[in-house]
């Protein structure tokens, strides 16, 4: 978990930087507005991190609006955790900066952390203390802790009945939920969750996703880091896909889908259904998958397909989305394309250095 006292810079350094950067920070905060007029509460500007020859984050620009459940998506090693560490001020960027509620990081990290909650990778607690005592102790690092607020956040994550139980006996999923409770303790403007379902069983993953979904419905702004495309689709309204530390695509989650969505169709007469679907959508719009018809009908075409099949006397047994595999393929296609582009750029740069 992250608190203002955990800065790698001294608090005095932040204080000296506050006066110098406050005017610029305030101006930037006023100018950062989303297209729908919601204010941007978390942003990165040309954020870059290099470890020797490894460029982990490459001039990354993000904008998270108030009320977003924002998916921060990419394969393992894409630079997600490094970016989050820079936002929290745990490591310094090579260039660029992050901005939280008008406060720049680095430079105004202590002020920025007053608006941030969350955890990086795995939340850590004292196993011999109860959940309530852990929240009391960790929360006190940022100021006085209200016992009523501790009960509120435990209730929000479904742990109120276990508040006096030692954390050492908690399951991994319960610890993840307690980490979210700790993130919410100070009523931050934004909470950042780094792979919160990592290592959980299916029920634990479902519980955490439902919790994040409820946080979004209540108006809490969430940055959710994940390498699971379907997870982001289930709980987020906006998302960015990154690879090799750079943006591949960004926008509303619905726009990150492949353009042509397909459905799988099972009927009482698959051959006749095939002919009907082909007449509607053409030979390129219909294929077979283990006995199912895969029809690229789009949202508007599905009702017409069902009506036509019924009119032709074909019993329709199932129509299910075929998008899950399509989304995964799309994700791989996007990230692999960015790998190819990056390799070409690196080869061109190397060739330029050789010629020089």
Image (cartoon, rainbow, N blue to C red):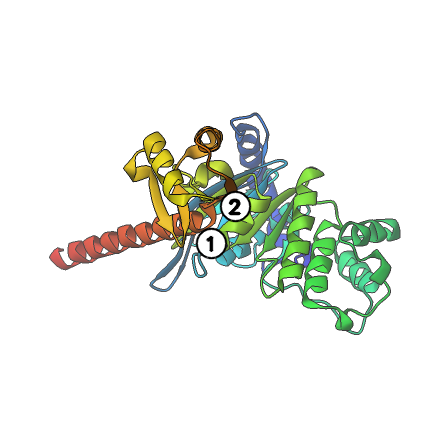
Closer to us: 337 or 61? 337
Residue at screen point 55% across, 51% down: 231
Tell me the SS state at disc 1: loop
Question: Relative to 170, does residue 254 appear above or below in the rendering?
Answer: above
Residue at screen point 49% across, 30% down: 303
Report the label total.
Answer: 2
Closer to us: 282 or 40? 282
- Give the mark, 2 or 1, whose residue is nearer the N terminus: 1
Residue 301 got which mark?
A: none
Q: Residues within 10 Å of mark 2 (few under 14, many from 20)?
A: many
- To which residue does mark 2 refer? 98
**Residue 103 appears left or right of 154:** left
- Give the image quarter of residue 290: bottom left
Question: Which quadrant would the N terminus be assigned to in this image?
Answer: bottom right
- To which residue does mark 1 refer? 93
Q: Please say if the residues under marks 2 and 1 sit with CB atoms less than 8 Å apart.
A: yes
Q: Note whether residue 120 is visible.
A: yes
Tell me the SS state at disc 2: strand
Q: Position of residue 52 (x, y in %)?
A: 36, 64
Q: How far is disc 2 from disc 1 in space, using C-alphas?
A: 9 Å
């Amino acid at each position: 978990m992250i608190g203002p006292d955990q800065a790698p810079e001294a608090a005095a350094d932040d204080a000296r930087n506050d006066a110098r950067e406050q005017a610029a920070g305030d101006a930037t905060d006023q100018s950062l507005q989303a297209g729908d007029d919601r204010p941007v509460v978390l942003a990165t500007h040309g954020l870059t991190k290099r470890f020797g020859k490894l460029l982990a984050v490459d001039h990354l620009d993000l904008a998270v609006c108030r009320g977003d459940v924002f998916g921060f998506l990419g394969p393992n090693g894409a630079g997600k955790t490094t970016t989050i560490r820079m936002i929290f001020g745990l490591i310094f960027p090579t260039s660029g900066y992050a901005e939280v509620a008008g406060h720049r990081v680095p430079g105004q990290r202590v002020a920025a952390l007053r608006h941030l909650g969350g955890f990086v990778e795995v939340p850590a607690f004292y196993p011999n203390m109860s959940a309530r005592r852990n929240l009391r102790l960790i929360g006190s690092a940022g100021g006085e802790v209200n016992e009523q607020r501790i009960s509120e956040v435990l209730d929000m994550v479904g742990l109120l009945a276990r508040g006096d139980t030692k954390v050492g006996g908690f399951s991994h999923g319960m610890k993840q939920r307690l980490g979210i409770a700790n993130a919410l303790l100070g009523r931050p403007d934004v909470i950042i969750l780094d792979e919160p379902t990592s290592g959980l069983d299916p029920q634990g993953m479902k519980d955490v996703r439902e919790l994040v979904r409820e946080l979004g419905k209540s108006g809490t702004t969430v940055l959710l880091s994940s390498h699971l495309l379907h997870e982001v689709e289930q709980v987020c309204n906006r998302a960015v896909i990154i690879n090799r530390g750079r943006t591949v695509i960004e926008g509303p989650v619905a726009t990150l889908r492949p353009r042509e969505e397909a459905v799988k169709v099972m009927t009482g007469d698959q051959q006749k259904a095939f002919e009907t679907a082909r007449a509607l959508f053409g030979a390129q719009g219909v294929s077979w998958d283990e006995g199912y018809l895969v029809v690229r009908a789009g949202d508007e075409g599905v009702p017409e397909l069902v009506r036509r099949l019924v009119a032709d006397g074909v019993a329709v047994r199932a129509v299910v989305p075929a998008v899950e595999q399509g989304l995964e393929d799309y994700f791989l296609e996007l990230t692999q394309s960015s790998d190819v582009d990056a390799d070409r750029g690196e080869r061109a740069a190397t060739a330029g250095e050789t010629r020089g």
